[in-house]
Amino acid sequence: MTDPQDLTRMLLDARDGDAAAEARVVELLYADLHRQAVRMMRRESAGHTLQATALVHEAYARLVGSKTPEWKDRNHFIAVASTVMRRVLVDHARARDSAKRGGPEKPLSLDVGLPLSVEHDPDVLALDRALDRLATLDPRQAKVVTLRFFGGMTVAEVAEVLGVSKRTVEAEWTMAKAWLRQQMAHG
């Protein structure tokens, strides 16, 4: 297990162009990112053309290719990676839809056994649109959903990333799910 302070230093060094630090960060965080990608891909249809490994690699390429924020720690890195993986999935779904290939993707659910709507679960594009609307109304709730749903983070991890209490995250998560259910039910 790597000391969180060492990991934070490596993240900062990688951001500043240290290739050795970047390689070490990838090695240390790859398993976390891959688990996150596997969770995301389980929500997709069995015939999905994007695999978990490809999702991690595409997200990492986008992270490295963009102006990297000043990483605070492992959770901050995972939080940003979650958002990037969401964008990769949305871009992939948009490309699929615009090419009119294949059938509809497997519906998504915010909780196992707790669909947003009894009749229709959201697809990744519908959820993305709803999250964008939520972000204009309540950015923190949208971030909680992104970290919990796309990032697979625990309530405690989200609380740490956002600098709020676990109770606040639980309340925000509950309210956001209810709002998203309502939005998805009414298109």
Image (tube, rainbow, N blue to C red):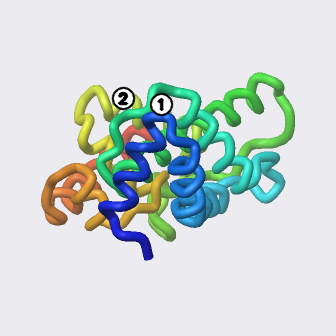
Considering only vertical position in the picture, is 66 above or below 37?
Answer: above
Given the image, on which type of amino acid does mark 1 rest?
Arg
**130 or 135, nearer to the observer:** 135
Q: Position of residue 185 (x, y in %)?
A: 45, 43
**150 or 23, nearer to the observer:** 23
Residue 159, located in which quarter of the rendered image? bottom left
Where is mark 1, residue-wise? 129
Where is mark 2, residue-wise? 133
Q: Position of residue 48 (x, y in %)?
A: 78, 50
Considering only vertical position in the picture, is 93 above or below 161?
Answer: above
Task: Residue at 72% x, 55% y: name it.
Answer: 53
**SS of the residue at dot 1?**
helix
**SS of the residue at dot 2?**
helix
Quadrant where the N terminus is found in the figure = bottom left
Q: Residues within 10 Å of mark 1 (few under 14, many from 20)?
A: some
Q: Residue furthest top?
A: 98
Task: Residue at 15% x, 54% y: name it.
Answer: 164
**133 or 10, nearer to the observer:** 10
Is 144 left, or right, of 28 in this rendering?
Answer: left
Q: Which mark is residue 33?
A: none
Is 8 left, or right, of 120 in this rendering?
Answer: left
